[in-house]
Every structure is written in C-alpha cells, then in structure tokens.
Image (cartoon, grey):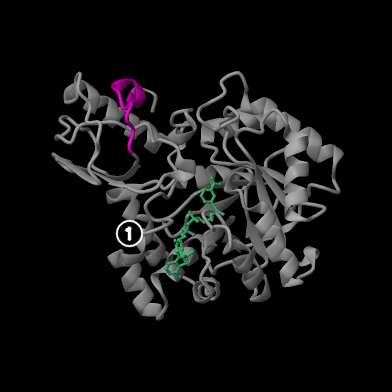
Amino acid sequence: MPASKSVKLNTGAEMPTIGLGTWKSGTGEVAHAVEFALKNGYKHIDTATAYENEAEVGQGIKASGVPRDSFFLTTKLNNNDHLRVEEALDFSLKALGTDYLDLWLMHWPAPMVQDLSGPDRSIDWLDTWKKMVEVYKENPGKLKAIGVSNFCIDWLKRLLENSDVVPAVNQIELHPSCTQEELVEFCRQKGIVVTAYSPLGSNDSPLLSNEIAKKIAGKYNVHPANVLISLQANKPGVNVLSKSVTNSRIISNLNVINLTDEEIKELQDIDKTNHFRVCHPNWTGWGSLGFSDCEMLRAIIQKAIESVIHAHILISLPSEIKIEGDGYVLHASRKPWLYGQKLNLAWGNQPIRACPDKWTFVFELVDDDKATPRHAEGL
Ligand SMILES: NC(=O)c1ccc[n+]([C@@H]2O[C@H](COP(=O)([O-])OP(=O)(O)OC[C@H]3O[C@@H](n4cnc5c(N)ncnc54)[C@H](OP(=O)(O)O)[C@@H]3O)[C@@H](O)[C@H]2O)c1
C-alpha cells in the first residue's frame, strides 16, 4: 500500500503522516529546527512538557510565520502533572504561544512524584484520563483531540471499558527493532491512530547501518533514514515522527518512498533477532507498563539475579557490557539516559544461565551507586 500523506483521526481531523520530533532538541537549536521545518514543508510538530522546550518550539513556530491553522501541533501531559490537568494544558498553550492544540496526549500511563524521581502510586492514570476527557469536552476551543502515549493493549482495554471517548492517537515506539505488531493492529481495530516515535532508533542508532535498511536504501537511492521513516508511513493508520536539528536531514527526512510488501516484511523481521527499545517504560518506576517484551526483559534480569548474582552486584559498570549465553546475547552500553533517570538495572558481567530467550536486547545503563538486587526486582 502506498505511503499516506495524512491519516484520519476518529474526530474526523486529518493528521499529517510525517511530523518533526523535538525530544532532545536542545536549547538554542529547537527553535531553528521548528522554524526551518515549517518553512520547508513540515505540517506537524511534536513536543512535550517533559522535553522542557515548549517555549522554544513556540518561538520557532512564531518565527516561521506559518499560520497556526496550516500545521498540526501535538504536546503531552507530563508524568508529574496528573493531578493538575487543566493547569498543565494552560501551561503548554502559553509556552507554545498558541490558543489550541490539535492533539494533547497523556505522555505515559505513569503518574510520578513532583521531581520525577519515582512513581506516585496514589494516582490512577485512569482518573487522569477522565479529567482529560472532561477538559476536552469543556474546552473545544483549546483541544481538538486527546490521546495517549506508551499504552499497551491491556492498558488500552481498561481505558476503553471506562471511557466514552476513544483516544484519537496512541503514540508508541516503532522501528524495525521494536515493531509491536499486535498493538498496532489492536489500535487499528479500535480506530486509534498509531504515531510511531523513534523511527530511526533515536540517537546513535544501529538501525541506520543495518544491512537490510542499507540494501533497500541502495535500491531506491535514498538514505537508510528514509527507509526507516517510510516503513512507518507505509502502514495504514500509522504516522511517524522523526527528530532532527540538522537542516539537510530535516529536508531529506520528508522523502517518503513506497516499499514493497516483501521489503516491509524484511524490515519488520529485524525485530525477531535484534530487539531493543529506546524508551524502556521502567524509567518511570512503574515497571513494564504491560509491554510484553519488557516483561520478558524483567524475567531475564530476574533470572540473572537468581542464577548468577547473589549478594554482590557489580556497582561500577564498564561502559560496554556484553553477556553471552546459549543462543542469546545481552549487550549494554552506557549513554545518557532520558531525563537523567536511572534505568534501575543492575547485574554482574557474567554469563546469564538458563536464559529462555533468543533475542538480542540493547540496554542503556547509567551509573547507579546504589545498585542492588532490589532495584532489578522493580523492573
Ligand atoms: N511519546 C514518547 O514517549 C516519545 C518518546 C520518544 C520520542 N518521541 C517523539 O518522537 C520523536 C522522534 O524520536 P527520537 O527523537 O527518539 O528519535 P529518531 O527520530 O528516531 O532519531 C533522531 C536521531 O537521528 C538523527 N537523524 C535524524 N535524521 C537523520 C538522517 N536523515 N540521517 C542520520 N541521522 C539522522 C538525529 O540527529 P540530529 O538531530 O543531530 O540531526 C537524532 O540523533 C521525538 O523527537 C519525540 O518528538 C516520543
């Protein structure tokens, strides 16, 4: 099926297929990226209160001179704003310098304490959703659509059973190493558009040098990034956000190609042997949030704790760890982690025995002086 130019939301609105992401687009670069993108054909900008750049995104929008009603704007309720939904919306509108949002998402079904250092278990995300629905119904001038992000099937089922508003969108991680096909199909059946985030695999992604992505890119004479973005744009009911602060890439990423069914399958199959997530839900302190691949990861770590690591956990992690066993490899590399949070992952650098899985996981780890088996149990 040829790539779409836009996808229809359950509100009737059209949401452009390609959007500019702004996560990790830093101070001094994001305003320019947004301005440049809007002036060069982007009709969809994605940001979030958590990215701490809404005001600069707003500056970029203003500087572009592009009329507000000719592009789609998404932002997200932060994890520590679940008890002040209305205030959070007004904060975002003011920072972005706009009267309305085309789409407002619950960023994670994971309420967190004020300083985002851990979960706030006194709050149920379903109550937050109900409040978002109330605000949406009462403020049609401020909100054109509401949706969710990082919701798995079971969490969506719970929401749908308890709400008369179906989320317009579920924004989730999607790339050849995190395909989540069942979740995408579930959303399609329920009339929920899926927005693919981290389509390139985010910073320093191994997907850009993946042999299959390179081979297909060679055939169409494009960059592997175009193949990865196009993969999502070729899926019905799916749109995609790619982030760049580099002018040439911002322009080049708009070049979407029509992939064959065989090429789509070949790319999707990468997940079977090389699975990773950029955003492991564990960073919120709420565990796997129902995502089955993360549950499997938790089981593997649990196994590691039981079978290898007893009283002593390796505290100072080397920058690269590779743990190999029968039919699997666990590979960990140290990179800055989202929001400076700990991944709360601790293990020894010894082989993990009796691992039931054959996937390769790529983790991101940070130093954690307090690493103890308890942390890993919380995964
Ligand atoms: N809802 C959520 O929880 C969530 C989570 C993650 C992301 N998101 C959204 O999805 C957006 C996209 O995801 P992402 O930022 O994680 O990653 P991404 O778009 O998969 O990758 C961005 C990285 O790829 C580089 N890049 C971009 N175009 C390239 C090209 N043509 N060739 C080579 N490298 C290229 C960028 O570098 P330069 O910028 O230096 O060019 C940046 O390092 C985010 O920005 C955010 O808006 C949402």
Q: Residue at x 17, y 23 (%)?
A: 307
Q: Quadrant of the C terminus?
A: top left
Q: Label 1: few (<14), some or many (≥20) within 10 Å? A: few
Which secondary structure type mostly characterizes the magenta part of the structure?
Answer: loop
| Range drawn in magenta | 367-376
Left or right, residue 155 beside residue 94: left
Task: Identify residue for label 1.
Answer: 206
Left or right, residue 326 beside residue 26: left
- Label 1: element kind: helix
Q: Residue at x 79, y 47 (%)?
A: 143
In depth, the one of 136 and 11 nearer the eye is: 136
Tell me, yes or no, if residue 44 can be seen here.
yes
Name the amino acid type tagged 1: Pro
Q: Is residue 79 above or below residue 223?
A: above
Where is residue 133? Give x, y as percent: 76, 35
Query: Is residue 375 covered in magenta?
Result: yes
Query: Is residue 94 covered in magenta?
Result: no
Where is residue 215? Give x, y as percent: 31, 72
Q: Quadrant of residue 19?
A: bottom right
Q: Quadrant of residue 87?
A: top right
Left or right, residue 5 beside residue 367: right
Which residue extends farthest bottom? 221
Q: Is residue 355 above or below residue 227?
A: above
Q: Residue at x 51, y 71 (%)?
A: 246
Q: Quadrant of residue 71?
A: bottom right
Q: Residue at x 23, y 26 (%)?
A: 313
Where is residue 24? Give x, y as percent: 51, 54
Tell me, yes or no, if residue 7 can be seen here.
no
